[in-house]
Image (cartoon, rainbow, N blue to C red):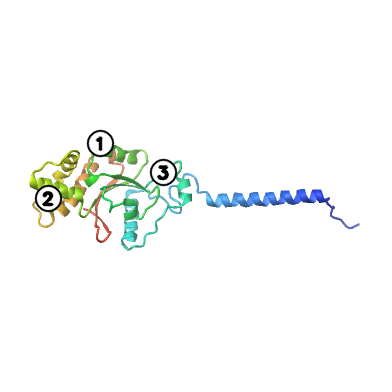
Amino acid sequence: MPATTPRRSPANRRAFLTATAATVLTSAGSATHAAAAPATGRPAAGRARPATGDEALAALLEGNRRWARVRSRHPHEDRARRVALAHEQHPFATILSCVDSRVPPELVFDQGLGDLLCIRTAGEVLDEAVLGSLQFGVTELRIPLILVLGHERCGAVAATIDQLRTGTRAPGHLARLVEGIGPSAWACRDEPGDWVDHTVAAHARRMRDALRADAAFRPAKVVAARFDLDSGRVRVLP
């Protein structure tokens, strides 16, 4: 006799269809979740985290070229990135920069959430809190690069030079900035040209050299750079 397919009662057919639909929906939902959820512990969605100071510097300069050409990609700003970083972070560079509102590191280097550890003080002046924050990046987060970023037309540098010219003491806590920037300004006071611009570069180098001389920062590459407000370009200083 030919084989026959067992007939299901209406109740059984309804149960069968309900179970089948639930299985399909569950499988589809699982596949969607797997596709959307980032891999845990992944430092940067879609690309490898720079492992060395040289690689980190190259990534920063590449991003800055995009910014200067007005071709920024604005990476790592989506929900998946926020979820991936909810419990851990893996920034690949530390930026010590001025507080100037025209010099936001994530924009200047075209980086996104979790890419940079940014420490900002007027004129990149160092103090114990700044040094501790920098060491946190090197020791705890294993960041391979520290970049000290000075910038064109720095107001903190200009104010310091005005104080040095007039001899008028800066009021309140501003005196601490003058104390921090003053030695850099005096070191280049006899150079021809723009005293403020010379001091911007000299001070970034001086902060770089101070960090290089500190054993706490030797695991990282430490460089100094200058940001040009007009062109948007960052230039590494010798």
What's the amino acid at mark 1? Glu
SS for tag 3? Answer: loop
Residue shown at 25% from the left, 44% from the top: 121
Q: Are marks 3 and 2 in contact (CB under 8 Å)?
A: no
SS for tag 1? Answer: helix
Q: Which mark is residue 128?
A: 1
101 and 96: which is toward the camera: 101
Residue shown at 77% from the left, 50% from the top: 14
What's the amino acid at mark 3? Gln
Residue shown at 33% from the left, 41% from the top: 138
What's the amino acid at mark 2? Cys
Task: Bin the neighbour count of mark 3 within 10 Å (Cα to Cα): few under 14, some 14-19, many 20 and up.
Answer: some
**Residue farthest to the right?**
1
For label 2, the residue is 188
For label 3, the residue is 89
71 relative to 13 in the view: left or right: left
Q: Work out how far the residue at label 1 is from the one at label 2, CA to CA, in angstroms.
A: 26 Å
Task: Bin the neighbour count of mark 1 within 10 Å (Cα to Cα): few under 14, some 14-19, many 20 and up.
Answer: few
Q: Work out how far the residue at label 3 is from the one at label 1, CA to CA, in angstroms.
A: 24 Å
**Residue farthest to the front?**
171
Task: Bin the neighbour count of mark 2 within 10 Å (Cα to Cα): few under 14, some 14-19, many 20 and up.
Answer: some
